Image (cartoon, rainbow, N blue to C red):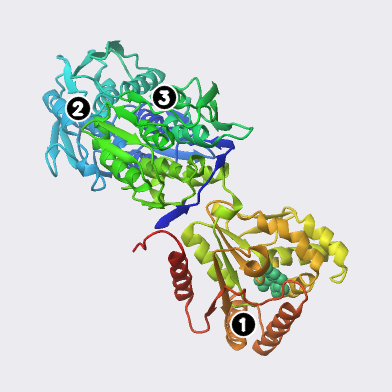
Amino acid sequence: MFDIPFLDLPPMGGASGTVRLPGSKSISNRVLLLAGLAAGTTVVHDLLDSDDTRVMLAALEALGCTLERHGRTLHVGGLGGRLKVHEAKLFLGNAGTAMRPLAAALAVLATTQGGRFELSGVPRMHERPIGDLVDALRPLGCTVEDLGQPGYPPLRLSGQAGGTLATERPIRVRGDVSSQFLTALLLALPLVADARAVTIEVEGELISKPYIEITLNLLARFGIAVQREGWQRFTIPQGSAYRTPGAIHVEGDASSASYFVALGAIAAHGGAPLRIEGVGSDSIQGDIRFVEAAQAMGAQVKSGPGWLEVHRGRWPLAGITLDANHIPDAAMTLAVMALYADGPTRISGIASWRVKETDRIAAMAAELRKVGATVIEGADFIEVAPPAAWRAASIRTYDDHRMAMCLSLAAFNPAAGARVPVRILEPQCVGKTFPDYFEALFGVAEAAPEDVPVIAIDGPTASGKGTLAAAVAARLGYDLLDSGALYRATGLAAQWDGVSPDDEAALAHLAARLDLRFGHGADSGRTWLRGREVTDDLRLESSGLMASRVSAHPAVRQALHALQLSFRRAPGLVADGRDMGTVVFPAAPLKVFLTASAAERAARRHKQLIDKGISANIEDLRADLEARDARDKNRSVAPLKPAEDALLLDNSHLTIEESVARVLAWWQERGPFEAHA
Ligand code: C5P
């Protein structure tokens, strides 16, 4: 996950390969609540792990449900409809799928069993309406207090044990602002349907019907067979009680799939399609119908149970006019596909966008205009005409995961003949539903090497290159190439195999077949050689000395050249070594040559070793450093020297943070984007 202030996406021209989708948010949070209310244990497979599910899990735990993780499954011990905890304050972040159903369920339980519950969220949650649900609960006999603005969270739900609910008459709820109010009642009222059937009537035209279908589908899995008359009347039969299905599988998120369906339509123009695993033709999620809309714009889609395969079809895409009431979330993706169409695309029936994570109509219009599109917005529609000229844009995401994921697709502008990068501000907002979105995107995106930015950081031994490079890479979300590790690993492999450091041909043979793996994510910073972890071995002084010897051989350097180039992948690379700027990435847009006095470097290395509990003599260290510097500088191939266009940075008197800030400032000056605080 990219927890950084911004992520710069280079222009990317193609896409192929396979994406595995995370679990559906809508299904995950419904399943969690149902499992939490049912009696017994429910084993949940492939649950989404994201901000929205985390707040639901924390709420269930606070209410006394038991949660046990076993690998990719979660065992939820439910309450069996009986409150264990009668007082709690629950923080629900910005998760509408937690706020609305928990409000209804706890209102019903507090009224009949006694309790006092406060539900709150982030400031945006307190701007998202819940009044229609409250208006349905109060006539039932529930005590619901507005703790902030009337009609919005936070709320307090309370009651005395033994209270009754007025379920003899139909319960009325409005359906035209959010379908989540109806979902909330459908999930809560089976708790009180043992003695008498409960009927819910919808006032006004029900929006987002497919989400109600998900609710009904999952209720059925938990033993509740709701009878439906059109979309106006829903009856929970007398004698209903939640029963765990034992185990349940969460299918991949169809809304998340939309970004990759769109990507395939825009950029899968090579031989292979873009394959999406986790949802397919058998999906119960309404957003799967996004596929039809994408096909109307030109996507070629094949599907089967649990998978989709997408190819670019018609190109440019066709502008369409669509009432997207049935796919409100995925429809956002159409607004971005519209950038690649041959005419305007008009999406209507999306008034609900205005009350989502942000006002999505306004946000989408503002950000699409930045890349060059012409946008008309109305109360319940948006019309997008493709850019005449693309512009490098810094995209605000409004703490809305879908804004970040949608606008990332603007980086595929080479498909439209442009070649501009896209900056996504606060990219970590994707954590709401798809924490690894950008990793998944870069896994299938193809960029021309010359479009992928490289920052080369060269310098002598112990100048602090490695630390600086890692910090700069982390801050930009770029990959890291520690080229010294390749030479060190070659030296280590030579030691293991008893190859002499003077045998150039044998060393080059080893280097060309180096089975080296660098850890990512939780394993970042760890390294394996031939399957054996060598993280610490590589850092030994002896490995450094060995590396300095093997690296003097031209054939060894040649053997490692292609491997080093292969690190240049989207979104970008920070490469440190001796010849990153001079030989390996001579066209790198930023080259830094890092120096520090030999005395300072020896003192730093000494401190590092002492901190690790390794005894060392500072004079010997300095002599070693100077010998290595001399060998690196005087060898015939790729000698250590600053590239002509390198910026010199003497960090003898700088902290690491100061050096990082200096390099980032240089980088910022080179890019097309405005500085950000
Ligand atoms: O940077 P590090 O100290 O890990 O590098 C170990 C040795 O590998 C250096 O002393 C240098 O001789 C060699 N090296 C190189 N070219 C690079 C990186 C490292 O020759 N790009």
Helix, strand or loop for disc 3: helix
Helix, strand or loop for disc 1: helix
Q: Dot 3, how many residues are within 10 Å of its Cα: few (below 14), some (14-19), or many (20+)?
A: some
* Residue at 22% across, 23% down: 175
Viewer-nearest of discs 1 and 3? 3
Three-letter residue code for mark 3: Ala
Three-letter residue code for mark 2: Thr
| Disc on the earlier residue, 1 or 2 | 2
In which quadrant will I find the C terminus? bottom left
* Residue at 43% across, 67% down: 669
Relative depth, front residue between 134 and 280: 280
Residue 665 at x, y = what percent?
A: 43, 69
Q: Which mark is residue 112?
A: 2
Residue 111 at x, y = what percent?
A: 17, 29
Question: Residue 15, located in which quarter of the rendered image?
Answer: top right
* Image quarter where ligand 1 lies: bottom right
| Residue 497 visible in rendering | yes
Q: CA distance from mark 2 to mark 3?
A: 46 Å
